[in-house]
Amino acid sequence: MSWPRIKTVLLHSWYHAMHSPETWADLVWFTFINILVFGLLSKVLGQNSQTFVSMLMLGYVFWEIIRVAQYSVSISILWEIWAKSFSSLFITPLTLAELMVGQMISATVKTFMVFLLTAGLSALFFNFSVFLLGPMLLLYGMILLWFAFAAGIFITGMLFRYGTNLAALAWSLIYIVQPISAVFYPVEALPASIRWISYLSPVTYVMESSRSQLSTGNVNWAYLGLATLITAFYFIASWRYMDMMYTHSKRTGSFARLGN
Amino acid sequence: MSQAIVSVDGLTKRYGSYTAVDHLSFEAQEGEILGILGANGAGKSTTIQMLLGLTIPDGGKVTYFGTDFFTHKEACLTKMNFASAYSQLQSRMTVYQNLRIYAGLYQVKDYHSRIKELLKLLEIEEYAETLFWRLSSGQQTRAILAKALLNRPKLLLMDEPTASLDPEIVNKIIDLIRKLQQSEKVTVLFTSHNMEEVARLCDRIIFLSHGKIVANDTPLELTKKIGHATLALAFEGSKTKISQYLNQQKLKFHFVNEYLVEITLLEQDIPKILFGLKEKDIWITNISIEKPSLEDVFLTISQDKPL
């Protein structure tokens, strides 16, 4: 793994973002509008109950970590495919691992920026500070970030395998996780027969623990341990899947066609 | 004896029951410009993709600079580069930014002066800060060439690099490749559909058909193998007399109009035929000889005819 080449991937990400209004719209504009709508809606539905507003805002701030990080990892490959510059990148000494590590670092920076925006807006307009979670916020954020990386890497693998036919998954697939992960409501809100699915998602543990911390001050360490293990499993499995699809597409010739 | 920069041994690629590349073996020496030609579906693109590591072969070995490519990809790719009109740069970056990125990936030292040098060489200095998608196709091709030369490659793979360029720029690029060959002993693997360009540039050509090499020689020797030339004669006199004479000589011919006949014959037979026609009192008013070209070789091979 070459650090100078990873730095170059970061520079690439920066140069690209400078000339891509869509990136800023996806990252900043939608976030800004959505948080205003979510905040106002929670005030109306919760009849100005601060607890209700806080729970929804917490869910939204945490969900944006997942959305932005996953999107940033997956979309970078698509930009190269759309520009027909995909092949050019892969015939340099750059390795897939270096590219992905670079994209994950870049995604972390973008996610941090969006997090500051959502945290700032929710504090400013809706009287909810996510920083009430204290140092635990870092642990929650890390689990969500790595889960998002796993999802982004998995989608990248799918793009290698199925090409741009599945391009829309780069920004939509992650939403399959949202309704089953107790993001805006507790697991109990789900029908009893499907609650077990919730516990396959590490996001559920983070959300349940953080809500519990906000309302009772207690951190559910068992939940956080499980979330870390499940995230690590998903990350390793996703990486392995991406690697397999990368090799598979090179064997079938579809990898070379992606760039044209 | 010069060192083989590229050595391909038994390279094979199958897609199901279809064999795209069939036990391909060839070498390219230091400083050699080797043309790889073939009709669509001949296996040319698959070969280039395998040589670049974009497609994994089913069998065979590729060695660059004496090093196995598939086990030492990074080391090999550092010393080579690729240019194709179809493999673009990132459209949402300026020319300079694109080159800066590739300089970083190839870890080019003193990249700023190298980029400036190449932009000047390819006459696109004024477009350094222009977004790639805003360039004309000719300017884009030159930017891609600048990318291909960034790391001072010892081996350059060029897949139709001059497609969409006007003849003046094509000439400049051919001159540039020749200069690189002479001054830096760069080895070039070159594909193009422009046979004139290939004939001018390549020291040697391999023709692919059905994934196999069917001809491997210099452009001159390949055209010699075609053997026949086309003799076009404008004449005054009887068409019947000419027909009789040419039939006697058992030559293939056809009348373009009442005063012009085209004859297919061996180059060395031309004087004999001209002399014979004179003896039959046929007055020749104009003579034109079309020698076999690389295009004839290409067409012959594409139609699965022997050379």
Image (cartoon, helix red, strand yellow):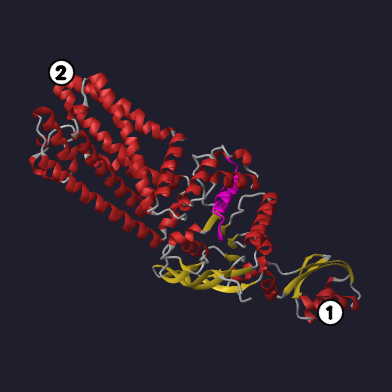
- Amino acid type at circle 2 is Gln
Against A146, residue A37 (above or below) is: above
Residue A181 point in image, percent of width and height: 18, 39
Which residue in the protein does label 2 denote? A47
Mark 2–mark 1 distance (CA, rounded to whole Å): 108 Å
Residue A197 visible in the current orientation: no
Residue A39 point in image, percent of width and height: 23, 23
Q: Is residue A193 left or right of residue A178?
A: left
Residue plotted at (71% across, 76% down): B227
Residues shaded magenta: B135-156
| Disc 1: host chain | B
Q: Is residue B149 magenta?
A: yes
Q: Is residue B154 magenta?
A: yes
Which residue in the protein does label 1 denote? B272
Question: Share a chain, discs 2 and 1?
Answer: no
User: Of B25 and B39, which appears nearest the observer?
Assistant: B25
Q: Residue furthest top?
A: A48
Against A9, residue B283 (above or below) is: below
Image quadrant where residue B222 sits: bottom right
- Amino acid type at circle 1 is Lys
Residue A79 point in image, percent of width and height: 42, 43
Image quadrant where residue B256 sits: bottom right
Against B10, residue A248 (above or below) is: above
* Element at label 2: loop
Image quadrant where residue B69 sits: bottom left
| Disc 2: host chain | A
